[in-house]
Image: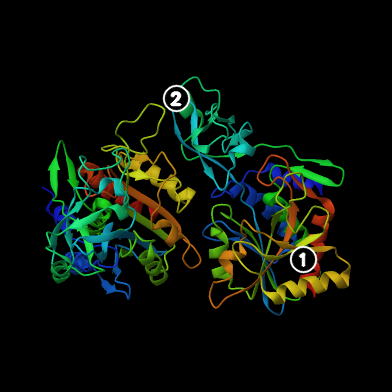
Amino acid sequence: MIDAIRELAGVSGVSGNERNISEYIKGQILPYVDKVYEDSLGNLVAVRRGEGSRVMLMAHMDQIGLVASFVDDKGFVRVAPVGHVDPKTTVGRPVVFENGETGVFICGSKEKKEPELKDCYVDIGAADRAEALRRVEIGQTASFLSNTFETGRKIVSGALDNRAGCYCLMETLRRVKNNSCELYAVFTVQEEVGLRGAKVSGFEIAPDVAIAVDVTLSGDHPDARETTAVLGGGAAVKICDRSAICSRGIIEDLENLAARRGIPVQRDVLASGGTDIGSVQLLGKGVQVGGVSIPVRYCHSAVEMADKNDIEAVIGLLTAYLEK
Amino acid sequence: MNKQLSYLSSLFGASGSEGDVRQAVLNEIRDYCTRIQVDRLGNIIAYKRGSVEAPFTMMLSAHMDEVALMVTAIDDDGYLKFDTVGGIDPRILPGKHVVIGRRKLHGVIGALAPHLAEDKEKAPKVEDLCIDIGARDKADAEEHATVGDMVGFDTGYQEFGEGLVRAKALDDRAGCYMLIEILKQDLPFDMYFTFTVMEEIGCVGAAAAAYEVRPQYALILEGTTAGDIHTEKDQTSVCRLNGGPVLSFMDNAAIYDRDFYRMALDAARGAGIPVQIKEAVAGGNESGAVQQALGGCKVLAISVPCRYIHSPVSVASLEDIENGIRLTQAILNQML
């Protein structure tokens, strides 16, 4: 598991620029699907033929990052956030641009108590503006670099949101034997900038049921806002978040299935944040939606932490759901 | 003088009240289109055949509406209270000439004179301002204006400096002008032209137009903010006048398709057309709504740099506008 997640976390895929991660995932899942294609926005859609209802499983493959917006006269690369970038947890991190150029994300406002994005820039060690522009093109995205490692039963990495979800969906595709449905496993784009990829993918697929496989916040560490889902509590069955209230039928199916199979589950009531189902639920004549989440501490930081047993439980529950 | 742009700019078309602009555009393009329809929201959806049948569906779009104000109440003394329709900074409103309603009643936006202002440092909010139509009292005002009347800026079109223009509503009559000029020329392949409504209040028209056209590629012609005044060396000016049409990689509404963006840059270089990159992630346009309609499509925006955008008067470069037309044509030629 750790090696697979380390590889996934090591491939860049800032929102709007997911080609690398898409190619990587495609290569891994090809043996386990009947058909795979990319749509107009770059969503990677894998199809497993089957009888019955149309089930769409979604894991977003994009990650938050930065985009170079202009270079000042001293050669510092001014950047804009792509997705929700919290300066408190990102300032000081090394970054890598699409073309491999590296730098560090720095905040220029020393006198302020808390760093603000408008004062932040990337220092690539350029001597002047001309050198910087030779090395980094305006519009290039940069992702935050991080290490992926194990500590106890936990996995720590800077891109668990949502490469952990991608891993779960990939593993589910590998493990599921006889799916009792027409399965669309979609690795979506542009989730972090507003659930955009899922919207067009959902429209095209027009599923009966859509389930998001994403991380959720775990507030079980000191000073955290308490959450219903915590690390080690099992797969988190989504009840609601800011983007959608899940369908009762899906919640019951997942919880009953977990009870029968002895898969540890907990409930996920998320007071902030949303997932891909938010933009799929209201498409067409409406879609039954649900979510199976992986609790993560320190979300959107360099050291997002998840529990291996929770990840295992998510894969087990998704596999059972598709075979039911 | 650019008579066409001058005429388009002079028309008033608040979001939802684009009738005059729509009529002008229809008159201008009717003889050149293969097919033309006005949809239920008021979008113009025009189709024109080109030299060959297109292997994909292409949509070019510009919006007809402009930022404006709306009368929300008439107070006891006969002043009109108002709210903004679209994004307008209230700090720029006091002292401006406006026209109200279909009868084009003249008025001026009032605020307390500096002698009387309690706090001179504080900018007035919309609710602190009112429109003075010279009415004696409430009853008199009610004879001339009604709650719900749209209020536009009373700004003439003038060319000045070296090839610059100052006018209202360049966002997005410049885009409408470009679209009309492109439509009048021979096209490399079949395509749709949409002149949309209600962009300034959330890209309402473009979404509906996209559902009708079902494009695979869309080019949005827009005005964008040029900040080339008082810019420090370590600040971005976003884009500048006379620097050429602007291509964006990302704004608040869309992340533009990578390949389409690169192809546009190549097309500009190949044709020797000046082009600049929008050096900021700010604002948004119809691209987001069109990109996410139906099963999605590949979008790109070509923008005209406008200083003081969303104000009673913007300044743009006529050369940028003409180069915007050339760039759009170069991109279209490269798409086959």
Q: Secondary structure at mark 1?
A: helix
Q: Are marks 1 and 2 on the same chain?
A: yes
In the image, taking residue A2 as reference, residue B85 lies left or right, namely left
Residue at 40% x, 49% y is B283
Disc 1 residue crowd, few under 14, some 14–19, many 20+, Cα 10 Å: many
Picture coordinates of residue A241 (x, y %)?
64, 62
Colour scheme in use: rainbow
Q: Chain of mark 1?
A: A
The alpha-carbon separation of the residues under discs 1 and 2 comes to 51 Å
Residue under circle 1? A318
In the image, taking residue B320 as reference, residue A229 lies left or right, namely right
Whether residue B330 is situated above or below residue B51 in the rendered picture: above
Furthest toward the top, the residue is A127
Q: Nearer the viewer, residue A255 or A95?
A: A255
Residue under circle 2? A129
Picture coordinates of residue A104 (x, y %)?
60, 30
Q: Which numbered marker is on residue A99? A: none
Whether residue A143 is situated above or below residue A178 in the rendered picture: above
The amino acid at mark 1 is Leu
Q: Chain of mark 2?
A: A
Quarter the C terminus of chain B occupies:
bottom left
Picture coordinates of residue B43 (x, y %)?
30, 69
In the image, taking residue B157 as reference, residue B22 lies left or right, namely right
Picture coordinates of residue A322 (x, y %)?
76, 71
Q: Are marks 1 and 2 in contact (CB under 8 Å)?
A: no
Disc 2 residue crowd, few under 14, some 14–19, many 20+, Cα 10 Å: some
